[in-house]
Image (cartoon, rainbow, N blue to C red):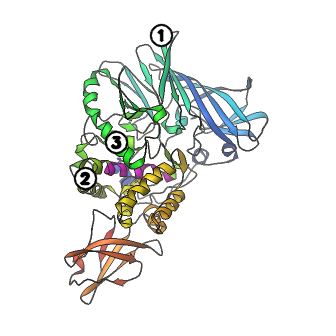
Amino acid sequence: MKSRFLLPVLLAITSVSAQNFTRRDSLQGGLRPERTSFDVQRYDLNIRLDPDKKYISGYNNITFKVVENTKRIQLDLFENMNVDSIIHNNRKLPYKRDNDAVFITFPQNLEKGDEQQLRFYYSGNPKVARNAPWDGGFVFRKDNSGKHWIGVAVQGTGASLWYPVKDHQTDEPDKGASIKVAVPDGLMNVSNGRLTGKEKLKGGYTRWDWEVKNPINNYTITLNVADYAHIHDTHNGLDIDYYVLKYNEAKARKHFEEVKPMLDCFESKFGKYPFYEDGYKLVETPYLGMEHQSAVAYGNNYKKGYMGYDMTMTGIGMLFDYITIHESGHEWFGNSITSKDIADMWIHEGFTTYSETVYVECRYGYEKAMQYITGQRASVMNAKPVIGIFGVNKEGSQDMYYKGALMLNTLRHVINDDAKWWAIILKYAETYKKQVIDTETVIAFFNRESGLNLTPVFNQYLRYRNIPTLQVRMNGNSFEYRWKTDVAGFAMPVEVSAGGKNIRLNATNNWQKAGVATDNPKGVEVVRTKYYVNTEVL
């Protein structure tokens, strides 16, 4: 989740036809030898956070494997943060800063296959978000008791906003991470994974130590600081933990009752929760929400819907807490299955938005699920492609959410076999579990498993702003039909209502005559709950 709901702003910028990218964009979004020559194995973050001064100091131990011989690597840290020193084998390494990139030079060649570690000391006042989670950065607030309440959300902006890291989605630490954060006594820090201990330090600080066993996205590594109450539960062998503001404990116990049926639903459709070793947590945050792996940020104020509002305008969105369901869906799609480049973020957001419909179907049935997802149509703008620009840290259209989900619902009904559809979705989630993939991988998988050539369908929905339009015209006492698309050779079956009955048309870009009588082409209507397409009568 990032900027799905800034519709007025998005509408204002859709008229911009071109964008100039800077060197900073290329340094953050691109892959060059200084990045591809090494593979991160582990991050061990150890910092102190001063809430009054909004100041971080500490270090990150970065363990990496050398993939290609090199003397120079690129790490990243926002340029407003200080690089205090970089230590390797007890020696300070020289470095050069270029925007947010930090190019580090070693005294001798690092040999392919070697495992190395450096310690990156840093400090500074990290960027404060103007409107998290849509604008990346820290949130420093006080709770109703006047105690510090702090969180951070950096999706799209970059994890290097607050700690030194290889800030690209292609490289997750294969052996996990540890996050140790010291905060003033009386406060607690909650990060990803499991709490392994705490240590009282000098100067009125306590350090809270967390350990992540799984690979983890850079942007989902997090900290949450408050005077938390801890609620522990289990479900089918999975540890479930809630960290909430103390005065919200009773409310949280009741409100989070939907978590267990949600987990049952998602595990039945997407496979076992991907991060059993790290547990599942919801952590109350001073911003709306974010899919922080095994420590999902929750800030929906214990309301149903999205801040008490149903974005689909169907009433069904008020049956559940949007933030709990959507952000938890990301544990499968985004945290487990990750896109190589944020230009392909539909792989995160399209599937996760679809998981909302899956949840509705699990709890309330197919008809309500179709009603819910059809209600999302009104929020799609179709102003620019879903897929963004590669290599410059540039997402595509925010249609990646709703349009991505509606495309998947369309594919379900193109396949027209629910047993096969759910088997494909389950196999997809399990095949690419804890992997980093791209759009081409997704398309190849769905082609293979469905036995259909879905490449033109994916391309039309993802690479062009327009959706397929079914054109209809009269021909004698019947009608003719074809697809109008940007993609050549487009073929997709579609179910329509015509002549008082539903029929399935195997439509292509070529005109075909329907085998049903009708005297009014305007009476030919696509079944809107099953397909996200337009209809045009000629």
Please tell me whether residue 76 is drawn above or below residue 431 in the rendered image. above
Q: CA distance from mark 2 to mark 1?
A: 54 Å
* Comes first in the chain, label 3 or label 1: 1
Magenta stretch bounds = 344-358
Q: Outermost residue toward the left?
A: 500
Q: Nearer the viewer, residue 398 or 257?
A: 257
Disc number lying in front (2 or 1): 2
Whether residue 183 is visible, yes or no, is yes
Q: CA distance from mark 2 to mark 3?
A: 15 Å
* Quadrant where the image shows the C terminus: bottom left
Q: Is the C-beta separation of discs 3 and 1 under 8 Å? A: no
Q: Which residue is mark 2?
A: 365
Magenta stretch holds residue 351: yes
Q: Which mark is residue 480?
A: none
Neighbour tally class for label 1: few under 14, some 14-19, many 20 plus, Cα within 10 Å: few
The chief SS type of the magenta part is: helix
Q: Residue at x 32, y 23 (%)?
A: 245
Q: Residue at x 56, y 51 (%)?
A: 21
Residue 502, horizontal then vertical, whole percent: 25, 73
SS at mark 3?
helix
Q: Which residue is mark 3?
A: 264
* Comes first in the chain, label 2 or label 1: 1
Amino acid type, residue under disc 2 in the picture: Gly
Please tell me whether residue 470 is drawn above or below residue 473 in the rendered image. above
Q: Which residue is mark 1?
A: 204
Magenta stretch holds residue 426: no
Please tell me whether residue 15 is drawn above or below residue 362 in the rendered image. below
SS at mark 2?
loop
Neighbour tally class for label 3: few under 14, some 14-19, many 20 plus, Cα within 10 Å: some
